[in-house]
Image (cartoon, helix red, strand yellow):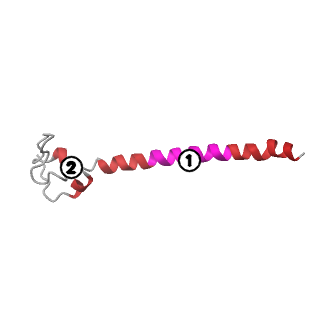
Amino acid sequence: MIQTYITQFVLPVIIWFAIAWFICDAIDSVVRGIKRIQYLHQIPCSNCAYFTGNHHLKCPLHPSEALTESAIRCRDFARH
């Protein structure tokens, strides 16, 4: 009797809960990934007049910050 209750009610509820949790987690991961990509697209280096495109020295003014998140607020950014 108790085994029938577990197999007919409890087990399906647990399985559906796990499926719902997996779907919600996947949607959350996609949303966080999209927000991260949108944030990284704010990096202005490729549109800057000082950007060289050379992989050895990408920016002569701030070489350690070029193409990183800290370049988003670059005070020396100049459009072409």
Q: Is residue 22 left or right of residue 72?
A: right
Q: Residue furthest right?
A: 1
The residue that appears at 30% across and 49% down in the rendered structure is 40
Location of mark 2 (residue): 44
Residue 19 position, x and y percent, is 63, 43
Near-viewer residue (75 or 54): 54
Q: Residue furthest top?
A: 54
Q: Which residues are magenta?
A: 16-31
Q: Earlier in the sequence, mark 2 or mark 1?
A: 1
Name the spot of residue 48 as percent of width and height, x first. Answer: 14, 48
**Which type of secondary structure does the marked residue at label 2 adopt?**
loop
Disc 1: which residue: 24
Residue 46, percent across and down?
18, 44
> Would you call the spot at circle 2 few (<14 residues within 10 Å), some (14-19), or many (20 or more)?
many
Q: Quadrant of the N terminus?
A: top right
Q: Distance of mark 2 from mark 1, alpha carbons?
A: 33 Å
Using residue 10 as the reference point, say whether residue 27 is left or right of it.
left
Counting from the top left corner in percent of width and height, residue 32 is at 43, 49
Mark 2 residue type: Pro
